[in-house]
Image (cartoon, rainbow, N blue to C red):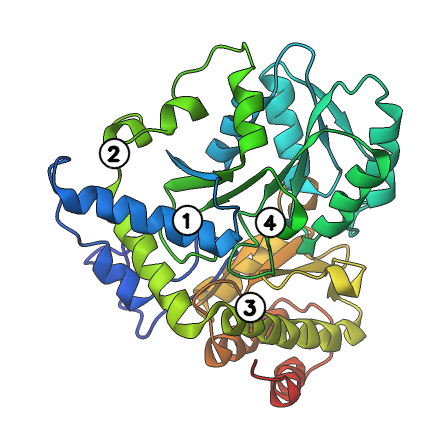
Amino acid sequence: MEPSMSLSAPRIPGRRLLHSPGPTPLPDAVLAALMLQPMDLADPRVMALIGDCEQGLKALVDAPADAELLFFIGNGHAAWEAVVANLLGPGRAALVPGGGTFSNGWAEMAAGLGAEVIGTPHAEGQPIDSAAVEQALRDDRDHRIAAVLAVHTDTAGGITSDMAAIRRALDAAGHPALLVIDAVASLAAEPLSMRALGADVVLGASQKGLMVPPGLAFMAVGQAALASARDNPVPRWYWDWQRRVAPHSYGKFCGTPPLPLLAGVRASLGLIAQETLPAVLARHRRLAGAVHAAVTHWAAGGGVGLHCRVPSARSVAVTAMDLAPGHDGEALRTVARERFQVAMAGGLATLAGRVVRIGHLGDQNEAGILGALAGIEGALGVQGIPHARGGVEAAIAALSVAPMH
């Protein structure tokens, strides 16, 4: 029985398909791991569990050996605030490249906490403009920019920006700013190497590609970022990275660790290792290609289209689908969910009502994607939104020719 259903509600047979970009469906192995009984904090199994998660996540982001893996109880926004609290302060500005709703959110948070924030122009439906990033760094002749805070995948627009291009912009400008990457929506979906990118911090959260419930934020922090935080006079306590570099569980979590969530992360890392990371990344590309093919086909009818205007920047985590003026995205979502049992996400901020988002992130396969697309195509018909019939067939065709690895 779904948690929202009462005993008096009509029974809905089968399973509602969850296709948001987070939270994502939980594999059975993760569900089983979440049933872990609590242990006293002196039990050696506690530190073994934390250590497994630290090492597994460092490997997943390809962190340098001397980087620290730090946890915070919270979501991706908690990780954002930890970065701001540790790296920004008097005389330290942040460059937040314009990349969509989540870049805007991180910039607003930093400004709300008193930091100076510099942005770059952003055009709707486009990834981060790396040339604008380079220019902003060149203009910062006094090197007041302490960190570049870059969102890898903006789930609001279904757009993934090129982090290697951001690294090149820093190098071309000869700027010493730290590179901080938000990989909340790209981790275990898009290729990402902290080492290859020369990134100083990579942050993530549990509820997306890791296929674990929300509640656990984490970040790999390199030595240069740790040194910068040590020199930052801004008062902080719970968010302080230095306190989290501790030899015992209570210090690592500034209190009691969330053992069931950690057990879920360990189970998820095991599943990724069993499938192999290259196969996981290939599966995300394959499923995303099917969704892109379906939406491209539907778009011939004039009522919908892909929000991301740059094909190479279309996310493998989520597809944002524009609706033509006069059509309500929230009404479409309601019909898809209640009549066809497909739950997708809505538009955020300026995209609210104009966009719906089809998630293909985490524990997803071909059958689930095709079922979701069939339900969405049915909802488009019910709502009278013009679209070319046959989007599911287009997705099948894309899957039929896509390489498995």
Residue 379 in view in this figure: yes
Q: CA distance from mark 4 to mark 1?
A: 22 Å
Does residue 305 appear to the left or right of 4 in the view shown?
Answer: right
Tell me where residue 15 appears, x and y as whole percent: 35, 71
Q: Secondary structure at mark 4?
A: helix
Q: Which amino acid does the dot numbered 2 rest on? A: Ser
The mark that comes first in sequence, 3 or 1, is: 1
Q: Which mark, residue 206?
A: 1
In which quadrant of the rendered view does residue 302 lie? bottom right
Q: Residue at x 23, y 42 (%)?
A: 47
Separation (CA) of disc 4 from disc 2? 27 Å
Residue indicated by mark 3: 281
Label pair 2/1, CB-CB below 8 angstroms:
no
The quadrant the N terminus occupies is bottom left
Disc 3 marks a residue whose amino acid type is Leu
Which element is circle 2 on? helix
Q: Who is closer to the viewer here, 60 or 133?
A: 60
